[in-house]
């Protein structure tokens, strides 16, 4: 389920952890609200902040090391019929013919919505994208955890930005102000950039999840065999925003997307 922590993404993960705890340490060493509350014995907020940072780091490692849904063998249950009767197969429009593709790299049959990742060297179920930040693919198994990680990380960064702002001290001149607040200002700038990045990522993923589409499908639908014949506004996997969100966050297990593709009027889960 989990990959080797000392794999190819070791340096990226190490850099992420070091940056996280260095920023946290700076917020406690400077005259921020965190330090003031710690010095006065009001430990609830500082402890909650550290716990939230710890949770974000644990989620980061979980998403980074988790199997995103690698296709490791041919699916024996996935046949051309997909559980459909001959009469139902005859009713399938010719524009929606199903061909089980065999990956030219790993030589395995590709389930619908899967794609081969050149970096991970595996086909990934419900492939979304390969994320260099976590040095792993985002796919069927870890996508919801990736979104949860973004939510927690955004809260931590927003909280950290507020705390860094609270630590700025006054000075008579700009030179004295920069000398007193230079490190905290640099920290706040880094946190602000990361906060904006995470917000954009989180917003785009929630939007795509509400449509039941992936980043790969959204960007490359004109080249994807099962989507290029659909209309510009047509998504064969869309069941409405609420059902899409419910299925994404609350329904576990592998989905046979071929059945969803051909049975749009029935419950695919």
Image (cartoon, grey):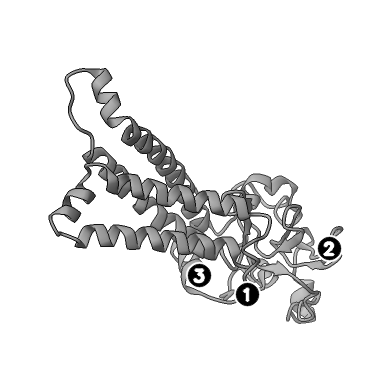
Of callouts 2 and 3, which one flags the residue occurring earlier in the amino acid sequence? Answer: 2
Q: What element carries label 1?
A: loop
Residue at image mark 1: 254
Q: Which of 54 and 84 is in front in this view?
A: 54
Specify the label residue 247 is tagged with: 3
**Residue 42: x %, y % from top left:** 15, 59
Picture quadrant where residue 52 is located: bottom left
Q: Distance between the residues labelled 1 and 3?
A: 11 Å
- Residue contact between numbered discs 1 and 3, judged by CB atoms under 8 Å: no
Q: Residue at x 42, y 59 (%)?
A: 56
Q: In this view, does 64 lie above or below 196?
A: below
Residue at image mark 2: 106
- Side of 133 where 114 appears, left or right: right
Of callouts 1 and 3, which one flags the residue occurring earlier in the amino acid sequence? Answer: 3
Front position among marks 1 and 2: 2
**Residue 164: x %, y % from top left:** 28, 41
Q: Nearer the viewer, residue 254 or 118?
A: 118
Disc 1 crowd rating (10 Å Cα; few below 14, some 14-19, many 20+) is few
């Amino acid at each position: 389920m989990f990959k080797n922590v000392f794999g190819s993404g070791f340096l990226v993960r190490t850099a992420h952890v070091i940056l996280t705890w260095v920023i946290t340490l700076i917020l406690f060493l400077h005259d921020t609200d965190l330090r003031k509350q710690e010095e006065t014995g009001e430990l609830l907020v500082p402890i909650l902040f550290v716990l939230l940072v710890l949770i974000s780091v644990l989620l980061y490692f979980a998403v980074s090391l988790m199997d995103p849904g690698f296709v490791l063998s041919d699916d024996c249950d996935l046949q051309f019929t997909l559980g459909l009767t001959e009469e139902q197969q005859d009713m399938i429009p010719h524009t929606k013919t199903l061909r089980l593709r065999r990956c030219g790299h790993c030589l395995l049959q590709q389930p619908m919505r899967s794609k081969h990742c050149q970096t991970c060297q595996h086909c990934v179920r419900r492939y979304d994208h390969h994320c260099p930040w976590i040095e792993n693919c985002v796919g069927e198994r870890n996508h919801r955890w990736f979104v949860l990680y973004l939510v927690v990380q955004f809260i931590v960064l927003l909280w950290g930005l507020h705390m860094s702002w609270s630590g700025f001290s006054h000075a008579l001149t700009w030179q004295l102000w920069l000398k007193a607040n230079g490190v905290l200002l640099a920290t706040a700038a880094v946190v602000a950039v990361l906060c904006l990045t995470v917000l954009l990522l989180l917003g785009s993923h929630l939007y795509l999840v509400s449509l039941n589409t992936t980043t790969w499908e959204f960007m490359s639908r004109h080249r994807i065999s099962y989507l290029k014949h659909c209309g510009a506004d047509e998504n064969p996997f869309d069941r409405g925003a609420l059902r899409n969100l419910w299925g994404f966050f609350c329904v576990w297990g592998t989905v046979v997307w071929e059945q969803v593709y051909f049975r749009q009027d029935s419950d695919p889960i």
